[in-house]
Image (tube, rainbow, N blue to C red):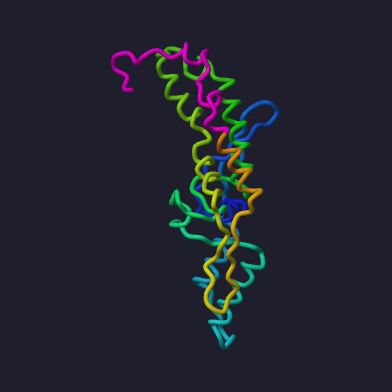
């Protein structure tokens, strides 16, 4: 659902963190209310059709309208598996394009690491607790990376029934190469290295604090 602009409460997006005016913004971290797909599902599951004479045709019409709006449904099984194929179905991701969103998320990660300092913990707390703050910042891109990587060898498809329009289309070579470039950036030495100024702030844990 995140590919359709958070169109369902049953989507599981990573918090949408953005950069605005040189600082982090959480104002769009999560969506509110039900989405477009939720309205389709509720109508299909619960609507009555008195006087229409054909409930089956009325239900099909609901799904047809959803298709016309390009609302897609793919199951959790398609999203959760690391080997799943659809380029728009992922867990914990955001945005209609997994690769472009990875590039955006990487810029947020870079900002987090550039701004990292002792001020990330309250006064009176051991410096070693900076490690707890560093981990989610350093791995900020992890879910979007998984989503982008699944675009390689990916395929657009739907759950068409016989008599409906079956859509099977491989992700274009151009998009797959762009995906490969973005993914490879995340395993370059400069990307993986923790800046020395951060390492110099974090000693081992003192007594009473678990690793």
**Residue 128: % across, % down:** 40, 16
Q: Residue 22 placed where, x, y %?
A: 68, 26
Q: Is residue 116 above or below residue 53?
A: above
114 is higher (above) or lower (below) than 35: above
Question: How many badges with numbers are in the image?
Answer: 0
Q: Quadrant of residue 179?
A: top right
Of all residues, the one furthest to the bottom in this rendering is 53
Question: Which residue is more in the foreground, 140 or 48?
Answer: 140
Q: Tell me which residue sits at (29%, 14%) in the image.
A: 207
Indicate yes or no whether the magenta region holds residue 104: no
Quadrant location of the C terminus in the rendered image: top left
Which residue shows up at 57% across the image and 66% down it?
Answer: 40
Residue 208 is one of the magenta-drawn residues: yes
Q: Quadrant of residue 106?
A: top right
Residue 141 in picture, x, y percent from top left = 53, 35
Quadrant housing residue 37: bottom right
Tell whether 123 sits left or right of 102.
left
Can you give x and y, in whole percent of width and height, for residue 84 in the image?
47, 54
Name the residue at the right extreme: 21
Q: Nearer the viewer, residue 143 or 150?
A: 150
Looking at the magenta stretch, what is its main secondary structure?
Answer: loop
Q: Quadrant of the N terminus?
A: bottom right
Bounds of the magenta segment: 185-211
Residue 67 is left or right of residue 135, and the answer is right
At x 54%, y 28%, the residue is: 188
Instruction: Name the residue located 59 percent from the left edge and 46 percent from the top edge.
Output: 98
In this view, 1 is above or below 68 = above
């Amino acid at each position: 659902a995140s590919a359709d602009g958070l169109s369902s409460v049953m989507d599981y997006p990573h918090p949408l963190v953005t950069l605005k005016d040189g600082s982090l913004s959480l104002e769009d971290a999560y969506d509110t209310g039900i989405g477009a797909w939720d309205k389709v599902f509720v109508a299909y599951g619960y609507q009555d059709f008195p006087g229409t004479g054909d409930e089956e045709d009325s239900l099909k019409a609901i799904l047809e309208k959803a298709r016309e709006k390009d609302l897609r449904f793919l199951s959790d099984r398609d999203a959760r598996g690391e080997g799943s194929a659809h380029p728009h179905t992922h867990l914990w991701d955001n945005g209609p394009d997994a690769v472009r969103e990875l590039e955006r998320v990487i810029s947020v990660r870079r900002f987090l690491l550039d701004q990292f300092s002792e001020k990330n913990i309250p006064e009176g707390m051991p410096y070693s607790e900076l490690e707890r703050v560093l981990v989610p910042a350093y791995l900020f891109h992890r879910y979007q990376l998984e989503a982008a990587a699944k675009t390689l060898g990916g395929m657009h498809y739907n759950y068409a029934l016989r008599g409906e329009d079956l859509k099977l289309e491989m992700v274009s070579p151009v998009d797959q190469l762009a995906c490969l470039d973005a993914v490879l950036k995340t395993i370059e030495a400069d990307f993986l290295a923790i800046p020395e100024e951060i390492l110099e702030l974090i000693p081992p844990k003192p007594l009473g604090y678990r690793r």
